[in-house]
């Protein structure tokens, strides 16, 4: 049972990792094509919109949540163990 649970958790973590990678690729694409909302010109490196900043914060929070969940599952004794 524990092995089945670990496989399920690994699958969930892989899925979350794939989503984070897709987000990362989307952010990179957005940064490479970013333009100033006022004049339409190219933005300075490191400058980002409020929405992009919010998405990055959410991405970071989710990464931390997945990490904490993973650590908790490793330290929680198995009910069958």
Image (cartoon, grey):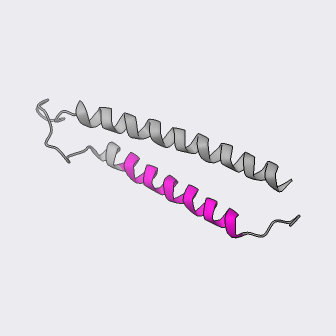
- Secondary structure mainly formed by the magenta segment: helix
Q: Nearer the viewer, residue 71 or 61?
A: 71
**Is residue 50 shown above or below 74?**
above
Q: Is residue 57 left or right of residue 5?
A: left
Q: Is residue 66 left or right of residue 10?
A: left
Question: Can you give x and y, in whole percent of width and height, for residue 35 in the image?
Answer: 18, 33
Question: Can you give x and y, in whole percent of width and height, for residue 64 in the image?
Answer: 50, 59
Total labels: the figure holds 0
At x 43%, y 39%, the residue is: 23
**Is residue 44 shown above or below 66?**
above
- Give yes or no for residue 16 being in the magenta stretch: no
Q: Is residue 75 left or right of residue 65?
A: right
Q: Quadrant of residue 36?
A: top left
Question: Can you give x and y, in whole percent of width and height, for residue 73 in the image?
Answer: 69, 63
Question: Can you give x and y, in whole percent of width and height, for residue 76 in the image?
Answer: 73, 69
Q: Quadrant of residue 32?
A: top left
Boundaries of the magenta span: 54-75
Q: Is residue 4 left or right of residue 53?
A: right
- Give yes or no for residue 63 being in the magenta stretch: yes
In the rendered image, the quadrant that contains the C terminus is: bottom right
Q: Nearer the viewer, residue 2 or 56?
A: 2
Q: Quadrant of residue 68?
A: bottom right
At x 11%, y 31%, the residue is: 41
At x 74%, y 47%, the residue is: 7
At x 53%, y 38%, the residue is: 18
């Amino acid at each position: 049972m524990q092995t089945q649970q670990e496989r399920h958790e690994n699958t969930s973590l892989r899925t979350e990792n794939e989503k984070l990678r897709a987000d990362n690729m989307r952010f990179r694409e957005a940064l490479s094509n970013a333009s100033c909302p006022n004049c339409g010109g190219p933005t300075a490196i490191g400058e980002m919109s409020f929405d992009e900043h919010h998405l990055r914060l959410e991405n970071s929070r989710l990464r931390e949540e997945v990490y904490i969940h993973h650590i908790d599952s490793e330290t929680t004794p198995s009910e069958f163990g």
